[in-house]
Amino acid sequence: MFYGWWIVIASVFSNGTGGAIHWQGFAVFFLPVTESLGLSRFQTSLVFSFARLENGLMGPFTGYLIDRFGPRWMAFFGSLMVGIGYIVLAMTDTYYQFLFVYIAVISFGASTSFMQASMAVLNTWFIRRRGLVMGINAAGMRGGAAIFIPTLGWLLSIYSWQAVSVGIGLMMIFWVAPFALTYRSSPERYGMLPDGDTRAMRAAAERAAGRGGAFRTDQAWGVKEALRTSAYWLLALATTLRLGVTSAIQLHAIAIFVWKGESAVAGAAMLGAVSAIAIPIILLMGWLSDRVARGPLLFASYSVSAVGLLLLNYVEGTIPVFLAFAMFAPAQASASVNWSLVGDLFGRRNFATLRGLLAPMYNGATVVTAAGAGYMYDRTESYTIVLLGGAVLLFGAALTFFVLKPPTRSIDRPASDTPVAT
């Protein structure tokens, strides 16, 4: 079997455990931590917001390190740091201690492990099947969320959040971190080609790049060269709008369910069920995005999710609320297609760096939207404004993806980078 598929399997298990718990599990801790430390929802939201701000500031640096030194050890030591951080987090008993450990240790480790490193290595090992493997990777995270979010909700109804945090830390160290050791820098370094192709297959795929509007190529763009294109900044705008909304809604999801009259345990179960619903959507979109243009596909996904946020304001009852929130699943399911565009537009060589340079923008937006959602609830005791504003911004992301076109080089401007040597 082509070794790239072993990397896919390892990434699925790593992100399905570590990524799912870290990036989506905070929603389950949100109310217990708020009540235990006597905080307002705005204060608890700030923890998540500052963590995303830290991730944004570190994004360009960690992206460069992954491109420079490879994803294996960055992911391994990052996972160990996350595990140690969760164990230390259980020993905190003040807001500022909690804030420091979560940001300086856990979030710092997560910025190099999980999705950042795994997407970089998958983008290097696959081109023709990039959308599919990115989708499988994202489905692994959603599958993990479908399992762990309801489980964490149940555990937190029995044990303290501190005890659950220690368990998470041990899992990160002894289960998640070893998967990173399977990562390898590039197929060419081991005498292979992306996707396990022969040279003839690779040449045919390169000739077919761009047909039917499904633009994707293995041409290597330099970082400065990419930053001079309008395509990069449109991609940055669309990604920022998309993540600003989805991160805030994900953080406050269980609190939104409680606002709509559900219990916290039921909210965790429904959030896990929506993650389960997202899995086949992710796989379908990953497969489909390798065959059609990704921009219009993203337009359709985020438009549906924007309508779901609008409906969530007005429906009542467990089933209508769940169905309205389930319409948000395509927004969660489309993330892998969004990240595949980075490789499609600018090649493999500087993927992690170019993706990392997006981090200050979309994480900065997350700081505002996640903390702003908590502030608005504290002031109004309602998520109405949050959901309406989120729907507008998400539709703006949909339109931006729709108009995004591939960059073009001037005929007299040579590429500033060359593809990875065979």
Image (cartoon, grey):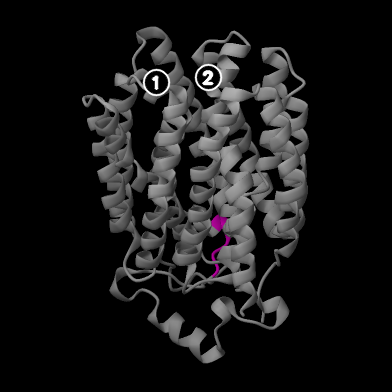
Mark 2 — residue?
Answer: 31
**Amino acid marked by disc 2:** Leu
Of residues 240 and 309, the one nearer the viewer is 309
Whether residue 287 appears in magenta in the rendering, the answer is no
Q: Could you say which is closer to the camera, residue 61 or residue 133?
A: 133
Q: Residue at x 61, y 72 (%)?
A: 4
Above or below for 396 versus 39: below
Residue 365, placed above or below residue 195: above
Q: Residue shown at 69%/15% (left/top)?
A: 96
**352 vs 117, nearest the viewer:** 117
Residue at disc 2, secondary structure: helix
Q: Which mark is on residue 258?
A: 1
Q: Residue furthest front?
A: 158
- Mark 1 belongs to which amino acid? Val
Q: Is residue 237 visible?
A: no
Q: Which mark is residue 152?
A: none
Q: Residues within 10 Å of mark 2 (few under 14, many from 20)?
A: some
Figure check: 386 above or below 150: above
Q: Is 36 left or right of 292, judged from the image as shown?
A: right
Q: How many marks?
A: 2
Q: Secondary structure at mark 1?
A: helix
Q: Is residue 276 visible?
A: yes
- Which of pointers 2 and 1 lies earlier in the amino acid sequence? 2
Query: Marks 2 and 1: CB-CB under 8 Å?
Result: yes
Cα separation between marks 2 and 1 = 10 Å
Q: Quadrant of the N terminus?
A: bottom right
What secondary structure predominates along the stretch shown in magenta?
loop
| Magenta residues (range) | 220-224
| Residue 128 screen position, x and y as percent | 46, 74
Q: Quadrant of residue 332?
A: top left
